[in-house]
Amino acid sequence: MKYKTHGVCSQEINFEVEDNKLVQVQFVGGCSGNTQGVSRLVEGMDVDEAIKRLEGIQCGFRPTSCPDQLAQALKIYKETLS
């Protein structure tokens, strides 16, 4: 799935889910080291657990962050399954 981010430095998040687990996560743009780190940490993680851990993280004074945007993308992904 491709998700267009809002309010952060990265422009897009691409991810794949198999059996409710994240198998591939790639941020387009943003702070390379941080986004690569987030990607590696969440790969293999259950979608619901990733949402629980990442949702609400802020970046400085911004009300969102790249991890929070991934949580939002995963929530939208889950809605499309319903």
Image (cartoon, rainbow, N blue to C red):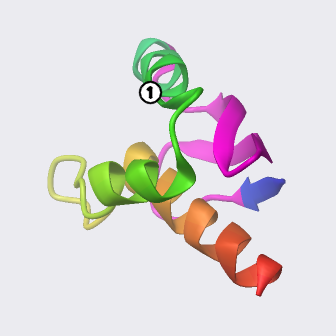
Say which of 60 and 21 sits in front: 21
Q: Please say whether residue 67 is one of the residues in the magenta stretch.
A: no
Q: Is residue 35 above or below residue 54?
A: above
Seen at 70% across and 47% down, the residue is 12
Residue 1 point in image, percent of width and height: 84, 54
**Residue 40 located left or right of residue 64:** right
Residue type at tag 1:
Val
Seen at 44% across and 17% down, the residue is 37
Label 1 neighbour load within 10 Å: few <14, some 14-19, many 20+ = some
Q: Is residue 29 above or below residue 56?
A: above
Report the residue marked by disc 1: 38
Residue 64 point in image, percent of width and height: 33, 61
Magenta range: 4-32
Residue 30 point in image, percent of width and height: 53, 32
The secondary structure type at the circle numbered 1 is helix
Say which of 75 and 4 sits in front: 75
